[in-house]
Image: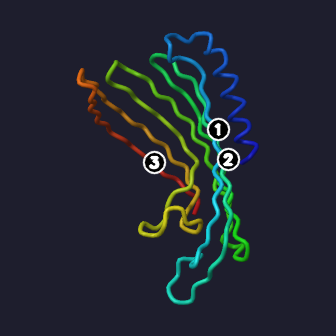
């Protein structure tokens, strides 16, 4: 998986750098945003069970980079990262959750756009349990297609509506 992420970054770099010369408008061009999230957790019920609970301390580290290219009518980009969750005593609860998202959004008119994306991300398995619970997350491949209509009014307010189609795939 790590090799696939590096290959994706290299491919995006090769594809996006020549497009920078074609940029038009003040908001056009390459952009990127790196982040690092550090979390410490004291969990009194690691496995989310009733009765006989097991508590532990965990440390989570989540480096992430978002990058892309924007022109007046097209935006393409990627969101890459990993969320490493390490429990001190309950090692079976430790995990690495990968995030690799690629997207493209095309403005069909000033108000209408279409966005396609493919994402390899963790997905919540059981609704009602904590979304950030490692054992309640499953790596899935998610493909999205969205059609969005947005309008800004002279008063500064805006209105938007859209339709989204999603396909999930997981080996588990």
Residue shown at the point (66%, 28%) measured from the top left: 12
- Residue 35, horizontal then vertical, whole percent: 63, 42
State the SS at label 3.
strand
Residue shown at the point (61%, 15%) measured from the top left: 19
Q: Classify residue 16 by image quadrant.
A: top right
Whether residue 61 is situated above or below residue 164 in the rendered picture = below
Q: Nearer the viewer, residue 33 or 11?
A: 33
Whether residue 31 is situated above or below residue 141 in the rendered picture = above
Residue shown at the point (34%, 32%) measured from the top left: 148
Instruction: For marks 1 and 3, give the CA distance.
Output: 28 Å
Q: Position of 80 compared to 75: left or right?
A: right
Residue shown at the point (69%, 73%) measured from the top left: 92
Q: Which residue is mark 1?
A: 34
Q: Are marks 2 and 1 in contact (CB under 8 Å)?
A: yes
Say which mark, if any, is on residue 63. 2
Q: Residues within 10 Å of mark 1 (few under 14, many from 20)?
A: few
Instruction: For marks 3 and 2, give the CA distance.
Output: 27 Å
- Residue 139, horizontal then vertical, whole percent: 59, 56
Q: Position of 105 compared to 84: left or right?
A: left
Say which mark, if any, is on residue 110. none
- Residue 135, horizontal then vertical, whole percent: 58, 69
Q: Residues within 10 Å of mark 2 (few under 14, many from 20)?
A: some
State the SS at label 1.
strand
- Residue 106, horizontal then vertical, whole percent: 44, 24
Instruction: For marks 2 and 1, give the CA distance.
Output: 8 Å
Q: Nearer the viewer, residue 149 or 26?
A: 26
Q: Which residue is mark 3?
A: 167
Q: Nearer the viewer, residue 49 or 144?
A: 49
């Amino acid at each position: 998986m790590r090799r696939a992420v590096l290959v994706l970054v290299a491919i995006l770099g090769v594809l996006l750098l020549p497009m920078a010369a074609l940029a038009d408008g003040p908001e056009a061009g390459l952009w990127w945003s790196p982040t690092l999230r550090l979390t410490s957790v004291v969990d009194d019920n690691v496995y989310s069970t009733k009765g006989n609970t097991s508590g532990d301390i965990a440390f989570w580290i989540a480096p992430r980079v978002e990058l892309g290219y924007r022109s007046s009518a097209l935006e393409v980009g990627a969101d890459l990262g990993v969320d490493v969750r390490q429990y001190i005593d309950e090692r079976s609860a430790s995990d690495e959750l990968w995030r690799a998202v690629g997207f493209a959004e095309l403005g069909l008119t000033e108000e209408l756009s279409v966005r396609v994306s493919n994402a390899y991300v963790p997905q919540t398995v059981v609704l009602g349990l904590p979304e950030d619970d490692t054992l309640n997350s499953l790596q899935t491949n998610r493909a999205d297609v969205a059609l969005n209509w947005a309008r800004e009014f002279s008063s500064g307010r805006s209105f938007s509506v859209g339709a989204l189609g999603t396909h999930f795939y997981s080996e588990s």
